[in-house]
Every structure is written in structure tokens, then in C-alpha cells.
Image (spheres, rainbow, N blue to C red):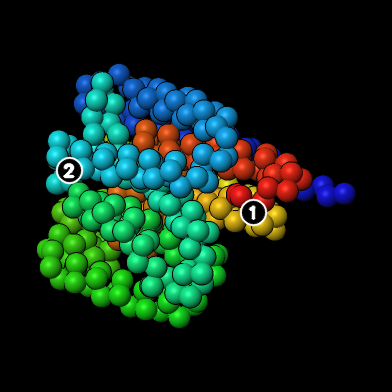
Amino acid sequence: MSYLPSARTTLIVCLGLLLSLSLLMIASASIPYALSKGIYPMRFFWSQALYMIIGMMAAAVVYHLPLKFYCRFNGILALWYMVVGMLILTALIATPINGAKRWLSFAGFSWQAAEFAKMVMVMVASEYAVRRSADMRDSILTGWRLFVWYVPVLALLISQPDYGSVVVIVATLLVIAWVAGSPLKDYVVIVMITALIIMLGILLAGYRRERLFSFLNPFDDMQNSDYQLSRSLIAFGRGQLTGVGYGDGIQKLSHLPEAHTDFILAITGEELGFFGVSLVLLLEALVVLSISAISYAALKRRQLRLSYMTAGFAAVIFGQVLINAGMNMGMLPTKGLTMPFYSYGGSSMLVSLMMIGMILKIDKESVNIERAGQSRNY
């Protein structure tokens, strides 16, 4: 008898702790920003709480849908068309914010289609990896049909521009392809092509060169290109091991703009110190490991679509944790990616909780599917 908690229990407990910590830190980080804008001080706290409630309701809906819906080609095709439609609508009518057109606004809410795209493209890749398993095992580069799915979505994301989401979606595809048995040599070619595209992108756009140099030397232009990153590092430096105390940070006082969003980990580092940041990253790691365990259990039962899909969701969450933590700590260039289940953001919270709903459904039904002898259909 094992005394370790199940993957399901670990996932739910860690997720609950992350959401609770998120509300606490958003309350602390957002009050000065809200006051500077002349709005209710707890506005962002209550907005995040509302996003969590809506996300949990969406997760409950997803949880009660039959798993066959997520495995059928027609259902996934409908979701893909929905993603493309939302991205086209974003390109046509979205209002530019800081030079990027990423948000659709309606009824006082903003929706970022890229978040939904991450979830749906995992489903696309998983379904394709099973339906075209011979192609995937031969070479991911010869699966031209897969590019028909990916090129429109990636092109629309690049036009926004949203390179962080592009990186996450492509990396997730590579993870699913690797789990599905694609040869290792393909990855060498893909890494070389990706590196070339990144170099060209940096050379052809001045703001990207500026962002890269900011990442390499975060203190050479602290009033301009290095502003956010340098303040983030100062926040970590002030926090040291135990932090300056909850609510006592100063970088949120207009030094680190909108600190409750992408740079909330830096405020956590300042107020709760190394131990606080370690706790957040540990909880995120346990969430990813729990999802991976559920994926492996489905794989052992030969439920390939469910296994690949769950592995893809784990890759999305892990990729965003890695990028967000890396940019907060000055190890990666700054990107507009949230810390899953932690940063302020409605679209990210909603889609992330929907993925959790699917994962819990897979965990619940996997054994019953095997007992019914239906594993090959999933």
C-alpha cells in the first residue's frame, strides 16, 4: 500500500494552494496601481476571484462532457475553426495596446484568443499524432498535413505579434511528437531552423534587438529598455531569503508597472523572499508532475489520444512557468506570458482551469475505458 497521495489529490491540493496564493499576492501587488488609476483598491483582487469562479464553472462544464468529444476529428475541427475565427477577428477589430493587437473586448471583459489557441492546438496535435502515427514516427517534417493546421494559427499570432505564445505552441507540438515516437534527428533540424528564424527576427526588428540587449545587460539603461527587468531583479535582491514582509514591498509603488500581471513573481520575491518564490515554483512543478503522471497512466493503458493530450497540457503549463520565471529572474528575454494559476489574467485563468477539468475527467474515466475494452478509441 502506498502512502503517497494520488496524482489527482496532489493536483487538486497544489492547485488550490496556488490559487489562494495568487489572490493574496494580487491583493498586495495591485492596490498601489489601482489607487494610481483612481479605481477601487481591491478591484483586481475581486476580478481575479471572479475569473477563478468563472474558470471553475467552465472546468465543470468541460469535466461533464463525454471524452469522445475531445477525441473525435469533427469536434476538434470545430474548435480549430473557432480559434482561427477569433484570431482573425482580433486582427481586424482589436484595439492596439502597447503596439500589440491581442485582446478582444466585450461587455467590460477582455479575451485573449491566444490562450484558447494553446489548448486547442494540443488537441489538434494529439489527434493528428494518433491518426497519422506512421507519419509521426517516420518524421515530423514530412507530416505536411499538420502544417495545414498550424501555419494559419501561427501566422495570425505572429501578426499580433505574440511570439511568446508561438514559442509555447511550437514547443508543445514537439513534446507531443516526441511522446508519439518522432525520431530525435528531426529535433536537430527544427532547432537549427528555429534559431535561424529567431536571429532573422532580431536583426529585422529594432525593438527585438533592444529587448535582447536588455536581457543580456539589464542595468545599462534602467530608465528605458531595461526598466521592467532591472526593477524585477531589484525586487528579488531586496527580498533575499525571507522577504521584506507581506504588503511591504516598494517595487509595486509605480516602480514595476502593473506588477500584478507578468511580474507578480518578482513582487513575491521581494515580499516573501526566496522561500516564497520556491513555494510557488514547487507547487507549479507538482502540478506539472501530477498531470504527467496522469498522462503516463493513460499511456500504459494504450489510450494514446488521452495520454498525448494530457502531456501537451503539462507542456503548456511547464513552458509558461519556465518562460515567466526566466524573464522575471533575468534569465530569458521579457515576454508577455503569465505564470499559470498565479498571475492576474482572465483568459489565462479560464483556459488553464478548463485544461484541468479535462485532465481530471481523463483521470476519472481512464480505468473504466480500459475495463470496457475501449482504449484503442481513446
Q: Nearer the viewer, residue 41 or 183?
A: 183
- Where residue 323 appears, as percent x and y from the top left, is 39, 56
Asked if residue 229 shows in the view, the reply is no
Q: Which circle's residue, 2 or 1, is located before the other in the chain?
A: 2
Image vertical order of residue 378 relative to residue 34, above or below: below
**Residue labelled with disc 1:** 376
Which residue is pictured at 20% across the width and 49% down the height? Answer: 160
Q: Is mark 1 on a helix, strand or loop?
A: helix
Image vertical order of residue 75 relative to residue 140, above or below: above
Question: Alpha-carbon distance for marks 2 and 1?
Answer: 40 Å
Q: Nearer the viewer, residue 342 or 220?
A: 342
Disc 1 packing (10 Å; few <14; some 14–19; many ≥20):
few
Residue type pointed to by label 1: Arg
Q: Which residue lies furthest to the right in this view?
A: 1
Label 2 or label 1, whichever lies nearer to me, is 1
**Residue labelled with disc 2:** 91
Where on the picture, by quarter, is residue 185?
A: bottom left
Which residue is pictured at 19% across the width and 67% down the height? Answer: 201
- Where residue 103 appears, as percent x and y from the top left, is 24, 37
Residue type pointed to by label 2: Ala
Q: Nearer the viewer, residue 204 or 305?
A: 305
